Amino acid sequence: MTLIIVTGDRSAGKTTFCTRLIELARSGGRDIAGVLSPAVIVNDQKIAIDVIDLRSAQRRRLATYNPAADYPRELHWRFAEDALAWGNTVLAESTPCDVLIVDELGVLEFERGRGWLAGLNALDSGDYQLGLVVIRPELFKQAQQRWSSARVVTIEDVDQANVEADQLWREISPG
């Protein structure tokens, strides 16, 4: 079992990195499970975040941008409780698998005891060959404390995310 913490600033390419690894794993016939959280961009602005079940390819709206939110209490995002619950179900049923992806865990999980707690449990289970968890830099220390033996990949540039994913897959491709 290999666990990788994927970190990087906002819009650095963390989800792009995960998407490329998903493509590589699928081309190798791997069982991929978990969730991917792509941004919804309209007129060059991030207006929402979706969540995709990596086994079924079902997609739901996870959060919408809420600029009037009282930061940091609501983090400028209004989360859809039904999508959070659905994502938890997806994550609770994700293991065992070859490749587990949890994009992403954040303030809700690490500081509020909400969000995708089933993602924490799935990662902790170790019931996968390769696990990737996306963590923002401001929560990296908490993630590293929880998963001290995890390898760390820092994504700095969306243009290099695919190259880095290709290189990583060659290094650690599950047998």
Image (tube, helix red, strand yellow):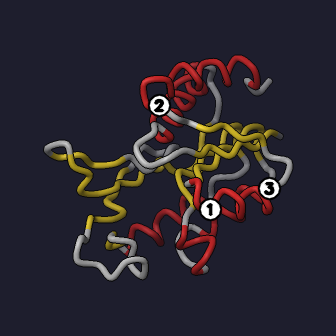
* Quadrant location, the C terminus: top right
Q: Secondary structure at mark 2?
A: loop
Is residue 48 found left or right of 85 in the rendered image? left
Give how far across and how far down residue 75 sits, in percent: 39, 72
Label at residue 52: none
Q: Quadrant of residue 57?
A: top left
Distance of label 1 from label 2 (alpha carbons): 19 Å
The residue that mark 2 highlights is: 157
Instruction: Decide which of tag 1 and tag 2 comes sooner along the chain.
Output: 1
Q: Quadrant of residue 50?
A: bottom left
Give how far across and how far down residue 73 sits, in percent: 42, 82
Q: Secondary structure at mark 1?
A: helix
Contact check, label 1 and label 3, Cβ < 8 Å: no
Task: Please give the name of the residue rendered at 72% of the width and 41% of the height, measured from the top-left corner.
Answer: 152
Distance of label 2 from label 3 (alpha carbons): 25 Å
Give how far across and how far down residue 114 sits, in percent: 55, 77
Distance of label 1 from label 3 (alpha carbons): 12 Å
Instruction: Decide which of tag 2 and tag 3 comes sooner along the chain.
Output: 3
Which residue is nearer to you in this view: 30 or 130? 130
The residue that mark 1 highlights is: 139
